[in-house]
Image: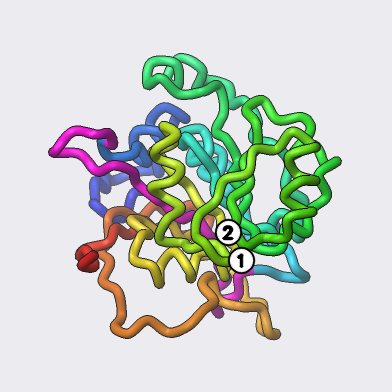
Amino acid sequence: MRRLFPSTAVPGPAPEWSTEELAEEYAYPPVGEGSDEAGWWLRGNMVASLDGAVHHGGRSQPLSSRTDMWIFGVLRALADVVVVGAQTVRQEGYGPAKRRSGFAGRRAAQGQAPVPAVAVVSAGLELDFSLPLFTEPVVPTLLVTGRGAPEDRVARAREAGVEVLFAGEGSAVDPALVPGLLARRGLRRQLTEGGPTLLGEFAGAGVLDELCLSISPRIVAGSAPRIMNGPVLPDPDEYVLDGVLEEDGFLFTRYRRSRVVAE
């Protein structure tokens, strides 16, 4: 795998990367309660085809590659929590986060749980609480919804042993409240894997700090959505390029938000 930006290119074959080197490449910035640190860091991770499609046949796997899945695993292994929308849980068949070999010591040293928690964001709570995501997690799965969510479904979730968190007074989740809600539970290194609606809501709320976008060298056509789906922003939000890796024609890009929206 080659690093294209910042460039460290040297003549000869592209070097082999270790998992530890990749973890350092994608390490989170300092997060905490200190005055010089952010209270949390919300990172998005998505894959898209050359023509902008976020899936093929309803799933992202046909756009992925071995290296893309490697990076996917490393990003999860670095996070305190994986934030995902209910539709993506249903569509992608989400299971609980897995232990990643080689990360136990790193996570313990940073005071992290053995694996990241999964936080499912849902307004309607139309979820199957008998799935392994809810019944067999190493770290209990969280459910984030609004206080106006259907009471019977909130009760059903709690009966299944799922902890329900409220972000907003209405039936829908207020995306601006989600990062702070999770950070107050000590879940400061945050990773969202979408889908497009949730990612668009985070961007629209001005809380998406970083986007890791894998560009697949494949064309899909059709009507698949872009990586973000939602109302247009009043003004385009500015991001700066932070890194680009390349392997087998895939580009693995990282962009960080360059300005802060006034509260």
Helix, strand or loop for disc 1? loop
Q: In x, y percent, where is residue 219?
A: 62, 76
Give the quarter of the figure containing the N terminus. Answer: top left
Color theme of the render: rainbow
What residue do we see at 60% from left, 63% from top?
Answer: 195
Q: Amino acid at mark 1?
A: Ser
Figure check: 204 above or below 161: below
In this picture, residue 30 sits left or right of residue 63:
left
Q: Residue at x 46, y 62 (%)?
A: 175
Regarding residue 249, the answer to whether it shows in the image is no
Determine whether, in the image, residue 94 is placed left or right of residue 206: right
From what the image shows, is residue 262 above or below residue 76? below
In three-dimensional space, the C-alpha distance between marks 1 and 2, rounded to whole angstroms, equals 5 Å
In this figure, which residue is indicated by the disc labeled 1? 171
**What segment is highlighted magenta in the picture?**
31-54
Q: Does residue 81 belong to the magenta stretch?
A: no
Q: Earlier in the sequence, mark 1 or mark 2?
A: 2
